[in-house]
Image (tube, grey):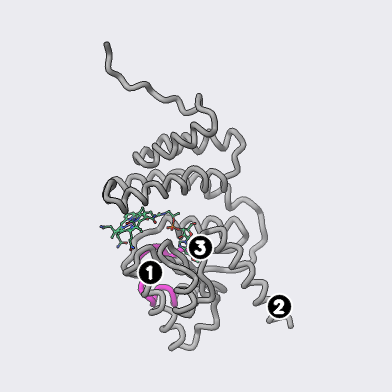
Amino acid sequence: MADEEEEIILSDLDDAELVEQMMDDLYDGLKDEITEGVNILLERGWAPYRILTEALVAGMTIVGKDFRDGILFVPEVLLAANAMKAGMSILKPLLAETGAPTIGRMVIGTVKGDIHDIGQNLVTMMMEGAGFEVKNIGINNPLENFIEAAGEFDADILGMSALLTTTMPYMKVVIDAMKEQGIRDDYIVLVGGAPLNEEFGRAIGADAYCRDAAVAVETAKEFMARRHNRVSA
Ligand code: B1M
């Protein structure tokens, strides 16, 4: 008897089975399958944000747990991250397509020593979708990069991301440098990343900690509204 694995036809699966399968495929770093799965869900009328959160982010959470527990290692996690990025690249233009007018300008990047960029890319996508203009300066940024980019881009908001307990203190280094240069209050400083919390955000002198991309959008909108009220008062 042939000992062949049965091929799974993604389009034959119902929505719940497909999402389950996509989480497995993300775990296995199968980029093409993730691309196909995202396209099928879009054809079935799923909203881009729902696909992002219920299939991709949820799948990445499982990867994160097994990475923590020593079941997965860096090469496998990199493959999963690439598969996630492939899915995100399909959703990006759709999330940005809301036609909302520009409501603010943001510079965002991951701090020095840290190369995690999936979360901040997601924040970028959601902010753009909500009508912000965003300059994403990528990973491993020393304080000069943040400060220069914020000035050049005439940003309202400076966003920093850190995923490591060893790199999160660097956010304070950036904020302290802004204070020294007398420019701290020129910007709304928002911080985010899995190991942070509200208390940390307050302690380092940020305006707010954002738990996820949706909270980042809401928080940015709130602060922009306050800023406009202050200017017009
Ligand atoms: Co790394 N890694 N990693 N990793 N990695 C974590 C963060 C870790 C928690 C895994 C674990 O042990 N469970 C752990 C950190 C432990 C700690 O510090 N306490 C860890 C480690 C240890 C490491 C290395 C040191 C491993 C090694 O080399 N031995 C190494 C460090 C490299 C470096 O940065 N110098 C490393 C490397 C990597 C890869 C390269 C393999 C890969 C990154 C690929 C990439 O990003 N291009 C990777 C990945 C993928 C992860 C996990 C599994 C997933 C991160 C992710 O993308 N999550 C992660 C485990 C985890 O977090 N559960 C882990 C999905 C993403 C959508 O969520 O990034 O949290 P997140 O972003 C959210 C919010 O946090 C928030 O909104 C986002 C969207 O909702 N947010 C913001 C984030 N940034 C924001 C900024 C804002 C606002 C909100 O500004 C306003």
What's the CA distance linking mark 2 and mark 3?
25 Å
**Which residue is pictured at 38% across the width and 76% down the height?**
143
Mark 1 closeness class: few <14, some 14–19, many ≥20 residues within 10 Å: many
* Residue sitting at x 35%, y 73%: 142
Confirm if mark 3 falls within 8 A of ligand 1.
Answer: yes
Tell me the CA gap for discs 1 and 2: 31 Å
- Residue at figure coordinates x 52%, y 36% from the top left: 39
Q: Which mark is residue 229?
A: 2
Q: Position of residue 46 (x, y in %)?
A: 59, 39
User: Which is nearer the N-term, disc 2 or disc 3?
Assistant: 3
Q: Residues within 10 Å of mark 2 (few under 14, many from 20)?
A: few
Q: Point out the image quarter for the N terminus.
A: top left
Q: Quadrant of residue 223?
A: bottom right
Q: Which residue is mark 3?
A: 211
Give the residue at mark 1: 111
Q: Is residue 53 left or right of residue 224?
A: left
Which residue is farthest right? Answer: 233
Secondary structure type for disc 2: helix
Q: Is residue 138 magenta?
A: yes
